[in-house]
Amino acid sequence: MDANGRLLNYIDGAWRQSGAAEYLTVVNPATVEPLGRVPLSPPTEVDQAAQAAAAALPGWRRTPPTERIQYLFKLKVLLEEHFEDLSRTITQESGKTLDEARGEVRRSIENVEVACGIPTLMQGYNSEDIAAGIDEFMIRQPVGVAAVIAPFNFPGMIPFWFMPYALACGNTYIVKPSERVPLTMQKVFRLLDELKLPPGVVNLVNGAKDTAEAILDHPAIQAISFVGSTAVAKYVYARAAGNGKRAQCGGGAKNPIIVLPDADLETATRISADSAFGCAGQRCLAASLAVTVGGAKKPFTEAMAEVAATRVVGYGLEPGVQMGPVISAESKGRVERLIAQGAREGAEILVDGRGARIKGCEQGYFVRPTLLHGLAPDSEVARTEIFGPVLGLMHVDTIDQAIELVNSARYGNMACVFTSSGAAARRFRYEAEVGNVGINVGIAAPMAFFPFSGWKESFFGDLHGQGLDAVEFFTQKKVVVERWPREWSRKF
Ligand code: NAD
């Protein structure tokens, strides 16, 4: 950041002032304090980053994987050393609590750790003697220049679903953070700068839609990782593919939690509340519908009403706070309008989080936990991603109906079941048409060594972020067939 609070780009191994005609003010959503100004970088700056990354590619690719990962080991150490500072920055710009931000930095580091296994992870395979004296090999090579276009809700973690793997596999990289939360990546790039990577291996270009589109259209960029809302994910997937790039695009969600009558009520309630209201409901794995089956209805509804009404809401840096604000005034207005719409569509507002005013943060974008009871499955609110701390409660009589409800959704990011029946849990795991399943778990977030899955309108593409999927995405397979007849060696 310069003396005027303007954030910088990082291109070709150096911090650069953007020549952007427009800057947006980044605001702390709890205190409404301005945190900096982010440039909407023009296509010429995307071009500089892409050219730098393309120029760095041959040298980086030839750097042995065992040497490439030495930079990642150092990055892990630096991330650990700056753990608290990064966590505080995430809280300041995104609003989540400090503990939630710490969880996010931890998962970022875990992805670096997994990518350090690349010398093994990117091995190919071979078959000796596919015919006499002929062998066949599959070797993995980097794809080229890759880029991530990231959302606002995980300013640190989401670029780390991709970047460490891309670099470890020998690609060069460009990060475009969300224009709403660009500060965390400024700090991450200060650490990347300390690694003394060859110039151009990693680049940071700030901006919004137009900057992202310049990335999607740039001929030197071969692979796009996108995470954001479904409409944009679909558009980015099509535009990247139209330009001949490989793409993996995560979209929105509307995640249901099923509570069977034999569930442990205390666990189901506590975990569902964390899932629905943690990060103010702004996780792509947030529970936004709780479907009770049979006798679970009354006790679960009463217990949820109690936890929703008593959750401590405030500024995430303050101790004891369990939930922060949503990201913007616009988002608060939208969430409150959807709550009202839920009531118009026949739901009862059992706990009403609208009109929240938090002492000391009166201007902040707070919505308290909200319960919409008796939401009709075909209502618009039951099918719309709210992305706020609003849980819709529904009731059905059988597990068949619950699974049918899960599978009728347009999204398929996550579904969870609470039960003490192994058979019911297995059936749910088997039949739920979603990419991430929780069994007595409310936020089924895959560890770094598993793919962050997602089905239907929650994901466009075939290879996900994290783990082996990321290694597949950031490598292209070359198959070699070699003939070396034994008799040719007779001259020696
Ligand atoms: P968003 O779609 O508004 O923005 C995401 C990114 O796309 C930003 O960097 C933005 O600058 C850029 N962008 C916006 N419009 C664009 C366009 N027309 N062309 C190209 N780029 C464009 O999403 P958001 O509000 O920042 O993030 C919240 C959404 O992300 C929610 O829907 C949430 O469910 C989803 N999300 C999904 C996952 C997942 O794994 N599936 C994870 C986290 C968040």
Image (cartoon, rainbow, N blue to C red):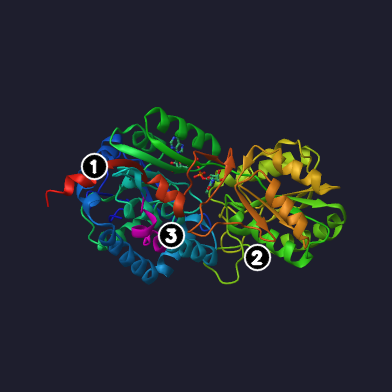
Is residue 328 visible in this depiction of the protein? yes
Q: Which mark is residue 465?
A: none
Query: Rounded to the nearest whole Å, what is the CA distance between mark 2 and mark 1?
Result: 49 Å
Query: Rounded to the nearest whole Å, what is the CA distance between mark 1 and mark 3?
Result: 24 Å
Q: Mark 2 = which residue?
A: 312
**SS class, disc 1:** helix
Residue 144, x across and y down, in percent: 30, 42
The residue at the point 30 percent across, 35 percent down is: 43
Is residue 39 visible in this depiction of the protein? no
- Residue stretch rendered in magenta on the structure: 111-125
Foreground: 369 or 330?
369
Residue flagged by tag 3: what amino acid is it? Answer: Asn
**SS class, disc 3:** helix
Q: Mark 1 = which residue?
A: 54
In the image: residue 25, left or right of residue 234: left
Foreground: 12 or 163?
163
In the image: residue 14, left or right of residue 314: left
CB contact under 8 Å: marks 1 and 3: no
Residue 275, x across and y down, in percent: 65, 57
Q: Which mark is residue 111?
A: 3
**SS class, disc 2:** loop
